Amino acid sequence: MKISIITAVYNDPRVERCLDSVASQQGNFEVEHIVVDSESTDDTVDVIEQYENHIDCLISEPDDGMYDAINKGIEAATGDVIGLLNADDYYQDQRVLHDVASQLAETGADACYGDLVYVDADDDVVRYWKSDEYSRYKLYYGWMPPHPTFFVRHEIYERHGGFDLSYEISADYELMIRLLLNTDISVTYLDRVLVRMELGGMSNQSIENMLTVIEDMYRGWKKHNRLGRFVAPFLHPVEKVPQFIRSPPGEKEGT
């Protein structure tokens, strides 16, 4: 199995940790790392050059934002399965992609997802996103799997498209609704932490961004399921509450 990992980056030297985590993956699979750099102007360029032997495809050109960059990566991908890893995210350990490949091979599912932990600058866990088993009905109550842990077979993107650029911040949420709610793809849950995400994403940076997220969610549900728009976008923040209470086994928690 060949897994294409797409990383979009712009002026974020933390991408070194991301690149290293992909390069260090071990197991019985082939990995293709596609990096889409929106013409960075800082040390990011030097970091990328240091990993040029581990990057299979580098796209460096202007774009219309992160989701446009990711769409370019999807178009360039040649793998059987596509996963996304943001510049400030990194894999939990060296066996993540091995376990994903094994899960998809054993189940024959179209998509696979797992758990995610949010970490601070010292790599201490501050939130634990325990996904739990998949159920389409949970989507109506605000549940959603962590997008960085979501791996999808290539043909699913070919059939249903990539990110809708009309969604300013939450195009990933709209894509998940589109794939999980309005298609018949099969989904499997891998019960383990797959990704470590450093706090500070676009959707958490300001009250304005948070309101934009809710607006994007509402639009996404209105587009794909009119009934869900009145419930899911507003229950989604409530769904996050357990993330602050649960603790992943064997992890050091921040204070």
Image (cartoon, rainbow, N blue to C red):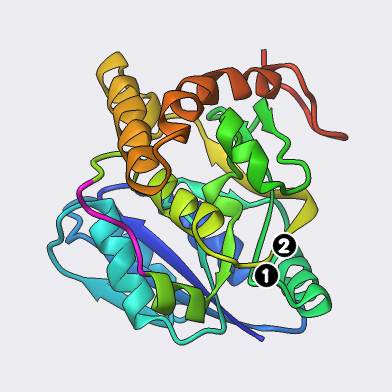
Local crowd size for mark 2, using a 10 Å CA cut-off: few (<14), some (14–19), many (≥20): many
Q: Which residues are magenta?
A: 161-166
Q: Position of residue 112 (x, y in %)?
A: 67, 62
Type of amino acid under label 2: Val
Q: How many marks?
A: 2
Quadrant housing residue 58: bottom left
Q: Residue furthest right?
A: 250
| Contact between labelled residues 1 and 2, with CB atoms less than 8 Å apart | yes
Type of amino acid under label 1: Gln
| Residue positioned 34% across, 81% down in the render | 76
- In the rendered image, the quadrant that contains the C terminus is top right
Q: Secondary structure at mark 2?
A: helix
Q: Secondary structure at mark 1?
A: loop
> Residue 82 magenta-drawn?
no
Quadrant housing residue 77: bottom left
| Residue positioned 66% across, 37% down in the render | 138
| Residue positioned 53% across, 49% down in the render | 147
Depth check, front residue: 90 or 149: 149
Residue ID for mark 2: 96
Residue ID for mark 1: 25
Q: Position of residue 152 (x, y in %)?
A: 56, 68
| Comes first in the chain, label 2 or label 1 | 1
Q: CA distance from mark 2 to mark 1?
A: 7 Å
Quadrant housing residue 249: top right
- In the rendered image, the quadrant that contains the N terminus is bottom right
Q: Could one spot residue 116 in this view of the protein?
A: no
